[in-house]
Image (cartoon, helix red, strand yellow):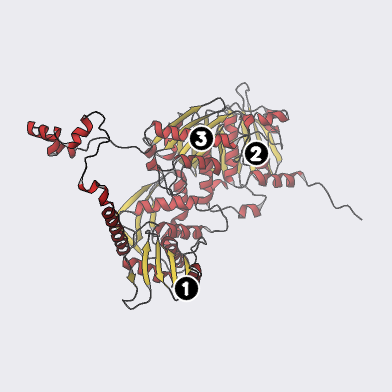
């Protein structure tokens, strides 16, 4: 019987291995930028065409490579940073496994130009499908220029899985920002299709944060600087007014490497507890520096997930550092003892204190309580303070309690749907739940989740069947975004039209809102779009939802009435009526129940009947 196990050809093995490292154009961007940083560059340019599908080029002024090193750099596991196994636990560079260039060369057409300062000529290498097509001397500047063209040209199935240009460009911008944020001492630029999106001059961390996140952060950043023998935490947190309803600008860097960690993110959120609303998230850019031996960064191909030797210590340090910064800059809640200007105009303050008034004050019991020795706890006796009056006190208290309860019931605004004789009654509880009679029992409706279901159905019909009517704005609103958000909005414009928004590009990263749905409150158009972008970015990384589905879910969540919002009688009636018009009124878009039914027999059992 013939043997069936055989070795894969090198080019196929390389393509399979490349799938772990190069998943989309942004993956190559990350690897090439990090290589440029490791090369000691002070200027790094990123050039993109067709969202990286046609071209990803990185040009740096680093130390360059020799002819031999330039050729070796494309071999798998070829690296200048690892000599023995112990080096894995002392890594301070961005790249180290020697897979990036080999992976890129396996799935793209690559051109490399590189030159060292001591060399008269540089080296030019062309590679396709892991094979060197051409190598020759060339005239070039000191440093390295590497171009990756026609990504996945030899793996068309992989290319077909790439998203729209706007979506892929957003991923590229994300990776660019993460590297640029980590190294503010390096000049970075990003150009796409001939247009410069970022021009980041070298500076300090705060300057780089403001360059990327926008000038609105200039006066809204609180610095953090804590140093211990174990680690150093530095960076900035946003003041409470920068908090968003979704996870916005949140960046963690460990030894200048961007990481994702829900655990450490919780540490920051916990430090803001009581300072921002529970449904909001703080912005931050935090840099953690510690001994490389205390972490393992080789646990994931993207190196964005790392393991700490003692994660609990890191958590405690971060939470303490953020709390200290908030307290140090008087961000934590405090009492305001400043005198209101209106108070200064009162008679008691502005008029002189006459002799008659002084005598009356000195003879008062309150004055004597504070002026006599050992009188701090003295209380002047009154008729009500006599022991014999305690029953009257208790009786009056009980009456007050009953009156209070009666008033609370009145304030609950019990109404009836369909007239006084209807069997359906409504009661809003805690401005969150709607209680109503239903058959032989009652329903408890969660107003926000119920409204999300209603709006989800409405926007789904608009997106797939009947477009929502648009109301033209008398005064169009200009919207300025960061490059990452602008790339995302470009990708959403055609779908936004379906749900009533008319948004047009206005040069660079600016847009003009020309129209919106009629039910959007006038003057709130800009905030609505900004919040929609934030929710869309962080809504879900689950690929089971299409772009349109995510947009519909985001709109339903954003426009729904919120828990804690008081509703009028008519609004409660309308909400409940609309909910039961749909086939699935019992669940929200995310699967949570919109209401809970309590039947009479269940209630009887609860009371032992």
Q: Label 2: which residue?
A: 100
Question: For the residue carrying disc 1, how many other residues have a C-alpha within 10 Å: few (<14), some (14-19), or many (20+)?
Answer: some
Name the residue at the front extreme.
388
Report if residue 44 is visible in the image: no
Q: Quadrant of the N terminus?
A: bottom right
Of the two numbered discs 3 and 1 in the rendering, the one whose residue sits closer to the viewer: 1
Mark number, residue 600: 1
Question: For the residue carrying disc 3, how many other residues have a C-alpha within 10 Å: few (<14), some (14-19), or many (20+)?
Answer: many
Q: In the rendered view, does 609 fall on the left or right side of 7?
A: left
Question: For the residue carrying disc 2, how many other residues have a C-alpha within 10 Å: few (<14), some (14-19), or many (20+)?
Answer: many
| Secondary structure under the numbered disc 1 in the rendered image | helix
- Is 389 above or below relative to 363? below
Q: In the rendered view, does 516 fall on the left or right side of 361?
A: right
Q: Which of these two is toward me, 502 or 236?
A: 236
Q: Are marks 2 and 3 in contact (CB under 8 Å)?
A: no
Q: Which of these two is toward me, 184 or 358?
A: 358
Which callout, 2 or 1, points at the residue further toward the start of the chain? 2
Q: Which of these two is toward me, 36 or 243?
A: 243
Which callout, 3 or 1, points at the residue further toward the start of the chain? 3
Q: Are marks 2 and 1 in contact (CB under 8 Å)?
A: no
Name the residue at the top extreme.
118
Name the residue at the bottom extreme.
421
Q: Label 3: which residue?
A: 318
| Secondary structure under the numbered disc 3 in the rendered image | helix
């Amino acid at each position: 019987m013939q043997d069936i196990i055989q070795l894969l050809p090198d080019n196929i093995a390389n393509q399979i291995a490349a799938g772990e490292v190069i998943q989309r154009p942004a993956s190559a961007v990350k690897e090439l930028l990090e290589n440029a940083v490791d090369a000691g560059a002070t200027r790094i340019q990123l050039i993109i065409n067709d969202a990286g599908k046609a071209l990803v080029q990185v040009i740096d002024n680093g130390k360059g490579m020799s002819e031999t090193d330039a050729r070796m750099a494309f071999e798998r596991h070829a690296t200048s940073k690892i000599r023995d196994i112990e080096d894995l636990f002392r890594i301070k560079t961005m790249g180290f496994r020697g897979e990036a260039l080999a992976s890129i060369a396996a799935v793209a057409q690559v051109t490399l130009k590189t030159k060292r300062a001591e060399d008269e000529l540089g080296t030019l290498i062309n590679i396709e499908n892991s094979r060197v097509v051409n190598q020759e001397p060339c005239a070039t500047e000191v440093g390295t220029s590497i171009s990756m063209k026609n990504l996945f040209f030899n793996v068309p199935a992989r290319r077909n899985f790439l998203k729209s240009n706007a979506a892929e460009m957003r991923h590229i911008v994300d990776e660019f920002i993460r590297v640029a944020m980590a190294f503010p001492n390096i000049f970075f630029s990003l150009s796409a299709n001939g247009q410069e999106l970022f021009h980041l001059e070298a500076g300090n961390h705060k300057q780089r944060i403001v360059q990327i996140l926008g000038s609105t952060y200039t006066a809204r950043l609180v610095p953090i600087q804590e140093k211990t023998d174990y680690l150093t935490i530095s960076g900035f947190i946003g003041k409470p007014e920068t908090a968003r309803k979704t996870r916005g600008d949140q960046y963690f860097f460990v030894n200048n490497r961007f990481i994702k960690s829900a655990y450490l993110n919780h540490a920051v959120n916990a430090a803001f507890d009581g300072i921002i609303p529970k449904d909001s998230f703080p912005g931050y850019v935090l840099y953690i520096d510690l001994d490389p031996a205390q972490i393992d960064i080789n646990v994931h191909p993207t190196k964005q997930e790392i393991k700490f030797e003692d994660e609990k210590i890191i958590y405690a340090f971060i939470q303490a550092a953020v709390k200290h910064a908030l307290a140090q800059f008087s961000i934590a809640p405090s009492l305001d003892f400043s005198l209101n200007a209106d108070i200064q105009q009162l008679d008691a303050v502005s008029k002189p204190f006459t002799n008659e008034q002084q005598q009356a004050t000195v003879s008062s019991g309150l004055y004597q309580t504070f002026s006599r020795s050992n009188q701090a706890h003295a209380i002047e006796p009154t008729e009500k303070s006599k022991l014999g009056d305690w029953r009257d006190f208790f009786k009056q208290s009980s009456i007050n309690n009953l009156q209070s309860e009666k008033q609370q019931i009145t304030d609950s605004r019990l109404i009836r749907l369909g007239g006084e004789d209807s069997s359906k009654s409504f009661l809003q509880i805690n401005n969150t739940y709607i209680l109503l009679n239903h058959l032989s029992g009652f329903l408890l409706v969660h107003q926000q989740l119920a409204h999300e279901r209603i709006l989800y159905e409405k926007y789904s019909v608009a997106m797939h069947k009947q477009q929502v009517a648009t109301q033209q704005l008398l005064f169009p609103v200009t919207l300025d975004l960061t490059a990452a958000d602008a790339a995302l909005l470009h990708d959403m414009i055609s779908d936004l039209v379906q749900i009533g928004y008319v948004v047009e590009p206005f040069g660079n990263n600016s847009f003009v809102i020309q129209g919106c749905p009629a039910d959007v409150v006038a003057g709130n158009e800009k905030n609505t779009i900004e919040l929609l972008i934030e929710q869309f970015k962080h809504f879900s990384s689950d690929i089971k939802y299409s772009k349109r589905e995510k947009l519909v879910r985001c709109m339903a969540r954003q426009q729904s009435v919120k828990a804690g919002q008081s509703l009028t009688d008519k609004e409660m009636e309308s909400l409940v009526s609309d909910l039961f018009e749909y086939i699935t009124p019992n669940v929200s878009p995310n699967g949570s129940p919109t209401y809970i039914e309590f039947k009479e027999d269940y209630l009887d059992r609860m009371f032992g009947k």
